């Protein structure tokens, strides 16, 4: 069964999400529609990219992902469909797709569906039709004009040396936990045989836990999560509020000589 996922910043208090689904179903009632999230912060490309990057590979290859985050984009942003890691994506070329994978885009087209459409609701009027047709087996080349590349944005990068890893908080989740961009494999490579100190705000820790439950209630924990990213939290508490950290806060790991 063909799958179309939806990721938007539309919220769930209005008709927008239902209207997108209705348009897809009108074109192809057999399509299975799965919601990723509709609670992306309004126009927040970084938030949308983080969520999409975290989950799209969990779906079968060939899945079509309709992305309606900052959907109207800027004055020069185009509406596109692309193939990446054997998944398909439809949305506005506002830079979000450059943040979800380090791999090369396999193909990308400017959607011809948008040529005669001046819409304040492209998720319904443009993206839904394109997603439904791709899910039904239509090649991208039949949906528009090939273009050479997509808009590129630069993601926050980890700086790593033999002495130190310098990272940042890239997401505060719904529990108030702080997700950093420090990856497990980078830490394990540099920490072999060394003691280390993890520092953020005014706090210093010399241990990374293997599970949340290793901390007592109200205590801080550090753990590599299911995405293999370093996560900082307060067991049964809100780390963002209690530690005074937020998106883009610095997190450093220093290795003893």
Image: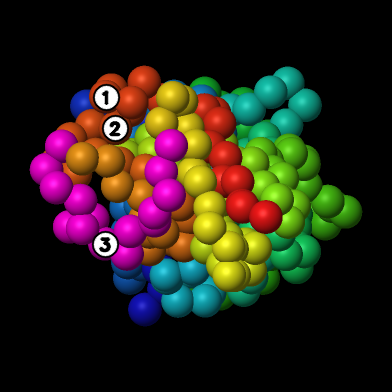
Q: Which SS class for mark 3? A: loop
Locate the C terminus by quadrant: bottom right
Relative to 191, say whether 61 is above or below: below
Q: Tell me what residue is drawn at x 52 percent, y 63 percent.
A: 184
Where's residue 40, x and y in %?
Answer: 40, 34
Q: Which of the numbered marks, if any, corresponds to residue 211? A: 3
With 131 as the anchor, is 40 left or right in this view? left
**Highlighted magenta segment, given as a residue range:** 204-218
- Residue of label 1: 242
Q: Tell me what residue is drawn at x 36 percent, y 21 percent.
A: 244
Locate the N terminus by quadrant: bottom left
The reply to whether callout 2 and callout 1 are in contact (CB within 8 Å) is yes
- Residue of label 2: 239
- Magenta span includes 177: no
Q: 190 or 58, which is in the foreground?
A: 190
Q: Which SS class for mark 1? A: helix
Quadrant in the rendering for residue 25: bottom left
Q: Name the colouring of the figure.
A: rainbow
| Residue neighbourhood size for the residue with mark 1, other residues' Cα within 10 Å, grouped as few (<14), some (14–19), many (≥20) | few
Quadrant in the rendering for residue 156: top right
Distance in Å between CA atoms under marks 2 and 1? 5 Å
Looking at the image, is mark 3 or mark 2 earlier in the sequence?
3
Q: Which SS class for mark 2? A: helix
With 140 as the anchor, is 6 left or right in this view? left
Report the predominant secondary structure element of the magenta stretch.
loop
- Magenta span includes 211: yes
Distance in Å between CA atoms under marks 3 and 1? 20 Å
Q: Tell me what residue is drawn at x 72 percent, y 45 percent.
A: 159
Q: 185 or 32, which is in the foreground?
A: 185
């Amino acid at each position: 069964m063909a799958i179309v996922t939806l990721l938007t910043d539309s919220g769930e208090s209005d008709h927008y999400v239902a209207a997108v689904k209705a348009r897809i179903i009108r074109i192809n009632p057999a399509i299975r529609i799965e919601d990723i999230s509709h609670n992306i912060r309004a126009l927040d490309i970084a938030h949308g990219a983080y969520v999409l990057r975290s989950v799209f590979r969990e779906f079968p290859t060939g899945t079509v992902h309709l992305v309606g985050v900052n959907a109207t984009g800027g004055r020069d942003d185009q509406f596109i469909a692309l193939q990446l890691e054997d998944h398909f994506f439809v949305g506005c070329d506002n830079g979000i797709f450059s943040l979800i994978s380090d791999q090369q885009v396999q193909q990308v087209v400017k959607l011809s569906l948008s040529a005669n459409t001046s819409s304040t609701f492209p998720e319904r009027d443009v993206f839904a039709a394109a997603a439904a047709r791709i899910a039904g087996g239509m090649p991208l080349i039949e949906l528009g004009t090939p273009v050479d590349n997509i808009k590129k944005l630069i993601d926050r990068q980890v700086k790593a040396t033999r002495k130190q890893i310098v990272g940042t908080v890239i997401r505060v989740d719904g529990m108030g936990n702080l997700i950093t961009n420090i990856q497990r494999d980078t830490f394990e490579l540099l920490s072999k045989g060394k003691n280390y100190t993890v520092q953020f705000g005014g706090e210093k820790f010399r241990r990374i836990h293997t599970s949340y439950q290793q901390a007592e209630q109200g205590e801080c924990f550090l753990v590599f999560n299911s995405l293999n990213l370093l996560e900082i939290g307060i067991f049964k508490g809100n780390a963002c509020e209690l530690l005074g950290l937020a998106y883009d806060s610095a997190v450093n790991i220093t290795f003893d000589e």
